[in-house]
Image (cartoon, helix red, strand yellow):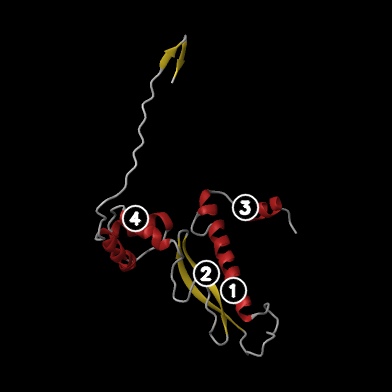
Amino acid sequence: MATKDELLDELLKGYEKPEDLLGENGIFQKLKKALVEKALGAELTHHLGCEKGKKPEAKSGNTRNGHGKKRVKSSGGEMELSVPRDRDGSFEPQLIKKGQRHFDGFDDKIISLYARGMTVREIQSHLKELYAVQVSPDLISRVTDAVMEEVREWQNRPLDALYPLVIFDALRVKIRDEGTVKN
């Protein structure tokens, strides 16, 4: 096995500018894609109960059945993943669920920007500028509408008649005592 330095040198081979490392097609994006695909493969291995290339011990008849393509939006931009499938379609990935089009945490970013008073168009422009991801105004509206009911409930909750309050106060004064200054 290669040492850590040799592995890093291999990864950084051809690095010339920051975009090669952090850009939409940079090393970090490629590593993220590879890690997610490996994790999805491991989930399928766990689901089937056998390693790739080996027959399942149980006579379920369910085996690996190639890969499907899926485009996912993330904080690093959009990437196309190769998601493994099983023959009977019972595999439900947990990392990126069926029908999910963006990584967890992406909605939190949208809500955070909305909470800071940005409009839907400003959020759309901001996400495109930062993450090179084109997000539809409809997606932003759906994400913000999903939390608006909870926000309204919290704003309209009944307030208690009395709230206990503890106040600490202090006054620090320097004094001279026997030729020395003390607090």
Any mark on residue 95, and which?
A: 2
- Residue 69 position, x and y percent, is 51, 75
Front in this rendered view, residue 54 or 19: 54
Mark 1 or 2 closer to N-term?
Answer: 1
- Residue 154 position, x and y percent, is 29, 60
- The CA span between labels 1 and 2 is 9 Å
Residue type pointed to by label 3:
Leu
The residue to which callout 1 is attached is: 43
- The CA span between labels 4 and 3 is 34 Å
Corner quadrant of residue 43? bottom right
SS for dot 1: helix
- The CA span between labels 4 and 2 is 25 Å
Q: Residue at x 60, y 77 (%)?
A: 44
- The CA span between labels 3 and 1 is 29 Å
Other-residue count near label 1 (Cα within 10 Å), few / some / many at <14 / 14–19 / ≥20: some
- The CA span between labels 1 and 4 is 33 Å
Corner quadrant of residue 1? bottom right
Residue type pointed to by label 2:
Leu
- Asked whether disc 4 touches disc 2, contact meaning CB atoms under 8 Å apart, the reply is no
Q: Residue at x 34, y 67 (%)?
A: 139
The residue to which callout 4 is attached is: 113
The residue to which callout 3 is attached is: 12
Front in this rendered view, residue 24 or 4: 4
SS for dot 3: loop
- Residue 142 position, x and y percent, is 32, 68
